[in-house]
């Protein structure tokens, strides 16, 4: 098959993911949609990632696979290298420790071909254990057709392995910001919706497998808050027409997310401090959002656990009480 004009380019940033990179790349190459290329950007890995990639390339002998190696520059830099190397009309992203379902590319291409206005497509994700076992737990987008304001309030695209983006969106809006060490995807989805006429549309099917690694479970609350504040400062300064109240609501929502993860990790003091910040910005959230209610309640009944509290709250809401 000729790879001169692939319709889809799948960009896989990889840094020290030797134990996971081979199945990730294979899941991209084994798509039912065949007119694609796979670009792996090895971002200066110091483990066995380069060797595993070389072995895979030798075994597969697939002209659609390209491996690019660069000095370590971070996730945004690796993705940007992949965008520059890409030749496809559409550019998809797959982190080096996640997987794509075999029909994901076909579903996204069909969706985006059906409506030229769609610039960003995304999907639900099923969670995997670190060893690859399926959990059956699915992360689904709250909103499948988010507006710019809804995207500012929360990253509805989800994790970095769900999106497929029309390349013209990057040509107009630019690349991932390399000065953001996290939340860089959230910022660029907002920027694309702001600078282009493109829409974002999600698929409800779980077409991505998101691997829960032990190293990623130790959530760095302070780093996340610092980076989301930086991303929101960028959005506020560049998108002058966005109401200041929306930015405040977005900060409250992201602090709520950080508080929940802190509570799950047993960091009670951090969770409490973040909830205080949420209250100062948007006190009504504790009356309208069950997740905020559950996080707050968990701090008073820690022995029951946050997940139990969330289940109880959800049950009462389901019964209309």
Image (tube, rainbow, N blue to C red):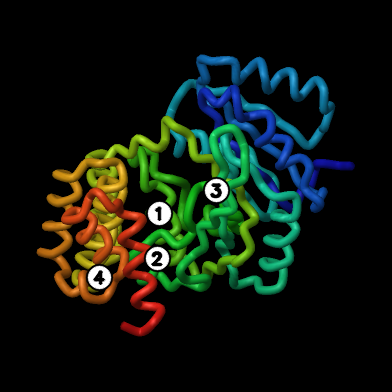
- Residue 190 occupies which quadrant of the picture? bottom left
* Mark sitting earlier along the chain (3/1): 3
Between the C-alphas of marks 4 and 2, the distance is: 11 Å
Gap between marks 1 and 2 measured at Cα: 8 Å
For mark 4, does the 10 Å Cα neighbourhood hold few (<14), some (14 to 19), or many (20 or more) residues?
some
- Kindly identify which residue carries mark 1: 186
Question: Nearer the N terminus, badge 4 or badge 3?
Answer: 3
Q: Which residue is mark 2?
A: 151
Q: Residues within 10 Å of mark 1 (few under 14, many from 20)?
A: many
Query: Is residue 219 shown left or right of residue 207?
Result: left
* Label 3 CA crowd tier, 10 Å (few <14, some 14–19, many 20+): many
Q: Secondary structure at mark 4?
A: helix
Q: x, y (%) of residue 311?
A: 38, 64
* 60 or 176, nearer to the observer: 60
> Circles 1 and 2: CB distance less than 8 Å?
yes
Q: Secondary structure at mark 2?
A: helix
Q: Residues within 10 Å of mark 2 (few under 14, many from 20)?
A: many
């Amino acid at each position: 098959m000729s790879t001169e004009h692939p319709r889809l380019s799948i960009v896989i940033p990889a840094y020290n993911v030797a134990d996971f990179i081979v199945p990730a790349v294979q899941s991209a190459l084994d798509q039912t949609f065949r007119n694609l290329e796979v670009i792996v950007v090895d971002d200066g890995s110091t483990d066995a990632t380069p060797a595993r990639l070389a072995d895979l390339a030798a075994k597969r002998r697939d002209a659609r696979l390209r491996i690019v190696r660069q000095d370590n520059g971070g996730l945004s830099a690796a993705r940007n290298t992949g965008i520059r190397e890409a030749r496809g009309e559409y550019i998809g992203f797959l982190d080096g420790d996640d997987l794509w379902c075999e029909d994901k590319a076909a579903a996204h291409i069909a969706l985006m071909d059906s409506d030229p206005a769609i610039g960003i497509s995304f999907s639900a994700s099923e969670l995997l254990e670190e060893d690859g076992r399926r959990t059956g737990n699915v992360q689904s987008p709250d909103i499948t057709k988010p507006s710019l304001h809804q995207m500012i309030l929360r990253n509805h695209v989800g994790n970095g392995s769900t999106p497929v983006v029309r390349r013209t969106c990057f040509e107009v809006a630019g690349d991932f910001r390399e000065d953001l060490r996290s939340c860089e995807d959230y910022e660029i989805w907002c920027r694309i919706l702001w600078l282009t006429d493109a829409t974002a549309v999600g698929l409800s099917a779980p077409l991505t497998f998101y691997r829960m690694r032990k190293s990623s479970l130790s959530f760095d609350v302070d780093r996340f808050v610092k980076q989301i504040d930086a991303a929101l400062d960028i959005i506020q300064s560049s998108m002058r027409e966005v109401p200041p109240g929306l930015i405040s609501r977005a900060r409250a929502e992201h602090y709520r997310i950080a508080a929940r993860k802190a509570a799950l990790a047993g960091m009670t003091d951090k969770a409490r401090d973040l909830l205080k910040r949420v209250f100062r910005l948007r006190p009504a959230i504790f009356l309208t959002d069950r997740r905020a209610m559950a996080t707050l309640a968990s701090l008073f009944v820690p022995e029951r656990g946050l997940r139990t509290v969330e289940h109880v709250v959800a049950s009462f809401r389901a019964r209309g009480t």
